């Protein structure tokens, strides 16, 4: 390798899907020409893969641009992905930006970097999305613990608050055989767990006439892959067949993340979600009936336009009465161009903050209850590589984080354990079972 390789750094904002895509994009840069360095260090080229789900995500992108410009004033800065697709001109006007690539163009990033000289005006390539958008295979690599495998992209749902269909286009997926081949590549690198990611993975098969359950069946046949985790699936797409597969005790892990967004049917209607709260509760209870110790998380949005205190209390009591194990809580963020941006009944930031606090407290309570329910149980843990304050950490099948005195021999291994207690930081303590 030559000594004049360009130092290139990647910075990813947003979801697991973005991380999978960033990893794939990074592998398109030949090692003989580029040296990958951490985004916290001085580099010749910075690549920012963006999210645009909330205003906070846009803000983080702008902050990253300023940070990298200050860290390395002469560095070439490329901004790609969802924010770049939606607001290319806005990004191109930010000082320090040299290249802006949209959702499809970002996968050809290496081809656009024939010259990395700083530009007076940013170069923009962000074309309109079409029904025939290609599916770009992606999976994360570099951490031998697990890999995020992209199985689906785009979304045909029209939720009133969401810009993802505008940023990523229509729902689409590749043939199952292609994904099985990708999973086999991952397994050949010694990775034993894959996390299935996408925008709306339960919608898998729309463009190929397949189904998500069939994909799961085929992926389970992959030699070397021991664990398959479903990242997030809509309640109306979580079928009895998928739940039954997780209950079989095979490779499909007993962990479901099911977006709720609101426990008020009135607000779900304003959000244009495709279910009512009874569908959600039915799915959660159905999972628990088949898999009593399954981990079940949910997304909740507070402060949606029109959400009264009564509506929020409906959500709070609805969640209190369900066996959920954790929540991801988001304050409503108005996105230009969405239906929700024009709805009346705006909620003050103070009310959003107060409602978020109450839900986060409820999440902590439910998570602690679930941890206590698991004490004394045996569980298979996949240990990670990193050392954390003298401990090695990992996850159980049902998504509880555990810790154990650091032992490098455990890294990237799946071991049988007994969950014995709760560590001061909230992780579970364990003992190994030979």
Image (cartoon, grey):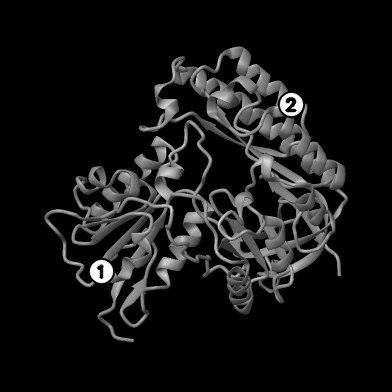
User: Contact, CB < 8 Å: mark 1 with mark 2?
Assistant: no
The front one of 431 and 245 is: 245
Q: Which of marks 1 and 2 is in front?
A: 1
Judge whether residue 405 can be spotted in this image.
no
Judge whether residue 79 can be spotted in this image.
yes
Residue lying at 44% horizontally and 40% vertically, measured from the top left: 53
**Apparent side of residue 289 relative to residue 254 in the rendered image (left or right):** right
Q: Residue furthest front?
A: 209
Q: Which label number is shown at residue 328?
A: none
- SS for callout 1: loop
Q: In this view, does 200 lie above or below 163?
A: below
Residue 51 percent across, percent down from the top left: 42, 47
The front one of 128 and 73 is: 128
Residue 351 percent across, percent down from the top left: 51, 17
Q: Which label number is shown at residue 113?
A: 1
The front one of 272 and 359 is: 272
Q: Mark 2 points at which residue?
A: 320
Q: In which quarter of the image is the C terminus?
A: bottom right
Residue lying at 65% horizontally and 59% vertically, measured from the top left: 210
* Dot placed on the residue nearer the N-terminal end, 1 or 2: 1
Mark 2 crowdedness (10 Å alpha carbons): few <14, some 14-19, many ≥20: some
Q: In this view, does 367 lie above or below 5?
A: above
Residue 245 percent across, percent down from the top left: 80, 56
């Amino acid at each position: 390798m030559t000594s004049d390789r360009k130092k290139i750094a990647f910075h990813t904002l947003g979801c697991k899907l973005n991380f999978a895509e960033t990893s794939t994009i990074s592998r398109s840069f030949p090692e003989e020409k580029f040296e990958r360095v951490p985004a916290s260090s001085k580099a010749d080229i910075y690549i920012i893969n963006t999210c645009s789900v909330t205003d906070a995500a846009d803000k983080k992108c702008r902050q990253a641009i300023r940070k990298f410009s200050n860290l390395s004033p002469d560095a070439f800065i490329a901004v790609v992905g969802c924010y770049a697709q939606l607001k290319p001109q806005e990004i191109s006007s930010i000082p320090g930006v040299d290249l802006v690539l949209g959702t499809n163009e970002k996968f050809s990033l290496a081809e656009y970097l024939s010259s990395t000289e700083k530009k007076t005006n940013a170069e923009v390539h962000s074309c309109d999305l079409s029904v025939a958008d290609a599916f770009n295979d992606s999976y994360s690599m570099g951490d031998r613990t697990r890999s995020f495998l992209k199985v689906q992209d785009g979304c045909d749902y029209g939720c009133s608050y969401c810009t993802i269909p505008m940023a990523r286009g229509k729902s689409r997926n590749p043939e199952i055989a292609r994904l099985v081949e990708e999973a086999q590549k991952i397994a050949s690198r010694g990775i034993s767990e894959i996390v299935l990611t996408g925008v709306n993975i339960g919608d898998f098969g729309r463009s190929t006439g397949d189904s998500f359950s069939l994909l799961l069946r085929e992926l389970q046949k992959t030699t070397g892959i021991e664990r398959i985790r479903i990242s997030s699936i809509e309640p109306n797409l979580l079928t009895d067949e998928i739940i039954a597969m997780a209950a079989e005790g095979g490779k499909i892990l007993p962990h479901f993340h099911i977006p709720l967004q609101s426990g008020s049917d009135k607000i779900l209607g304003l959000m244009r979600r495709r279910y009512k709260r009874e569908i959600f509760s039915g799915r959660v209870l159905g999972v628990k009936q088949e898999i009593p110790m399954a981990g079940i998380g949910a997304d909740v949005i507070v402060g949606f336009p029109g959400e009264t205190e009564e509506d929020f209390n409906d959500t709070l009591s609805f969640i209190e009465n369900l066996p959920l194990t954790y929540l991801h809580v988001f304050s409503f963020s108005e996105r230009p161009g969405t239906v929700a941006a024009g709805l009346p009944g705006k909620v003050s930031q103070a009310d959003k903050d107060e409602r978020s606090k109450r839900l986060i407290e409820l999440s902590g309570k439910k998570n602690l209850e679930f941890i206590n329910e698991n004490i004394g149980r045996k569980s298979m843990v996949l240990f990670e590589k990193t050392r954390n304050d003298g401990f090695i950490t990992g996850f159980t099948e049902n998504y509880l984080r555990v810790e154990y005195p650091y032992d490098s021999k455990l890294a990237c291994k799946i071991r049988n354990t007994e969950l014995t207690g709760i560590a001061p930081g909230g992780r579970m303590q364990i003992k190994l079972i030979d």
